[in-house]
Amino acid sequence: METYRLITSLSLILQLLSRVSSPATVEESPEFWRSQAQRTLQAALDRTPNTNVAKNIVLFLGDGMGITTYTAARILKGQLQNQSGEETVTNMDTFPYVGLAKTYSVDFQIPDSAATATAYLCGVKTNLNTIGVSAAARNGVCRSQKGNEVTSILRWAKDAGKAVGIVTTTRVQHATPATSYAHSASRKWYSDADLPASARTNNCTDIASQLLSNTDIDVIIGGGRKYMTPRGTRDPEYPRDYSSRGRRKDGRHLIQEWQSLKAGKVAHYVWNKTDFDAVDPETTDYLMALFEPGDMHFDLERDPLMDPSIAETTEKAIRILSRNPNGFFLLVEGGRIDQAHHAGRGSMALHEAVALDRAVGKALELTNEEETLIVVTADHSHPLVINGYPFRGNSILGKSPLWASDMMPFTTLMYGNGPGNKMEGGKRPDIRKVDTKTSGYVQLAAVPLKSATHGGEDVVILARGPMAHLLQGVHEQSYIAHAMAYAACVGTDRRHCAARPAVAAARNQAGP
Ligand SMILES: *[C@@H]1O[C@H](CO)[C@@H](O)[C@H](O)[C@H]1NC(C)=O
Ligand SMILES: *[C@@H]1O[C@H](CO)[C@@H](O)[C@H](O)[C@H]1NC(C)=O
Ligand SMILES: *[C@@H]1O[C@H](CO)[C@@H](O)[C@H](O)[C@H]1NC(C)=O
Ligand SMILES: [Zn+2]
């Protein structure tokens, strides 16, 4: 124990010595904090609720972006810019209104992305693994789906004459985007080849086919080519890779069908960045961009010559959808924060969240707060903790200077469960010589699981623009769809249209 204390003290002293030379002098002045607080206070005093009708809605969804991820991503973003990071203000941090959403599903305390998407997109809580159906439907039971379908705000917006789009970093048939356009008793029914026999006899259809048969979606961007083409179809990017080939057993080529459906319109299908960059938003009615056979690459592993970033896809989507004089609804999903967390890869998860923050910044740049409601939220959390007593500016991906009672350091980020539980003879791995900042590093987990589970605490809701103040407070996640719909005057509650004419309508009446 004496040795342990000695080592800990030495480590702390060394850290303190290096700290003395780092410049944090402005923060030593009380005036720094007082004047900063005065500016914040004045901004709060000057803020009046924006009660316009939202012409446009952009909903950013960080899949698995719990509050610890949110904080850690802020620190990482600052540190990538050579700041300490804790004080960094992200694009998300600039939103004036903040609330919390309770994420539990009808059947589980800790939910999945399908049940939660049905809550915040369709306004109805449901069961785990089910998409666009109420809780009267049962996971995987096609027969229970009939009559229990619920529609999403993407549909309500389309019915109100708005343009609609989905942007994701996963396959476009994945739970989050799928819930905006599909009804499926199972989130796993990506293509017809994934439908069990009972689902086929009961006439349930796969998610990919519903991309064409339900709401007419103006912009579709993500991955997921293989669910769109007949079995064995070679992928254009990976022609030799067998697992990338088409999956469909029904022989349908949904990309070609989509192109024929849009005949007479300017509709582009692209699968690489060259063609994507060549798409002129000014003249484009429809865009389907599928950059990978399945999910897109993690942003850190993305080839920037082949695949655009989520900021670039968000920009293209907004530019195309903005052509509609009635406005638009756009769902943007940073879908792989969740997947990195499942793999226990803290660095990768945070970099994905930073990429999403850049996309939020792009949307702030391209839209007007008077007429565009922007909401940023998450579907659920993950069992990530930020722990120890790291010094100011310590790498968020680094180790705490405080050693544990086993006389070994530990990382600031850790998981409650997941693949990072690698006990050897009752001891955790010695990480003194391990670089914990690499994108592949798997942080320690208390309990072994091949894939980390989700987390159950509330998630943040950030809002800016018309009626953003409706999202303050602690709410059921299903409330989000209703508040957004009210703001934009779409869906069944149209009271807001009568109360305030849309900004666009007012402008049109005013004449040129
Ligand atoms: C941060 O510092 C490193 C090392 O000094 C430098 O290579 C890098 O360009 C800097 N990055 C930024 C964003 O300033
Ligand atoms: C499925 O669709 C076929 C063809 O439209 C119809 O004949 C059959 O009755 C349907 N089955 C069910 C269970 O709805
Ligand atoms: C992008 O896709 C187009 C259309 O299939 C193709 O002609 C072009 O070669 C592709 N570009 C790259 C870099 O693969
Ligand atoms: Zn997940």
Image: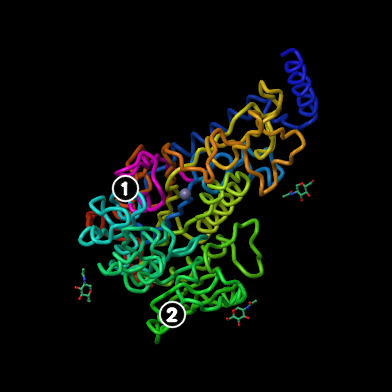
Q: Which residue is mark 1?
A: 478
Q: Which residue is mark 2?
A: 253
Indicate whether 186 appears above or below 410.
below
Residue 243, magenta (yes or no): no
In-image side of 425 versus 243 (left or right) = right
Residue in the picture at 63% in, 46% down: 347
Residue in the picture at 40% in, 60% down: 188
Q: Secondary structure at mark 2?
A: loop
Please name whichever residue, 509 or 321, is drawn nearer the observer in this view of the structure: 321
> What is the span of residues highlighted in magenta in the rendered image?
95-118
Residue 115, magenta (yes or no): yes
Image coordinates for residue 68, horizontal then vertical, percent = 53, 38
Q: Label 1: how many residues lie within 10 Å, few (<14), some (14-19) or many (20+)?
A: many
Image coordinates for residue 167, horizontal then vertical, percent = 47, 63
Q: Label 2 is placed on what type of residue?
A: His
Question: Which residue is farthest bottom?
Answer: 264
> Residue 32, located in which quarter of the rendered image?
top right
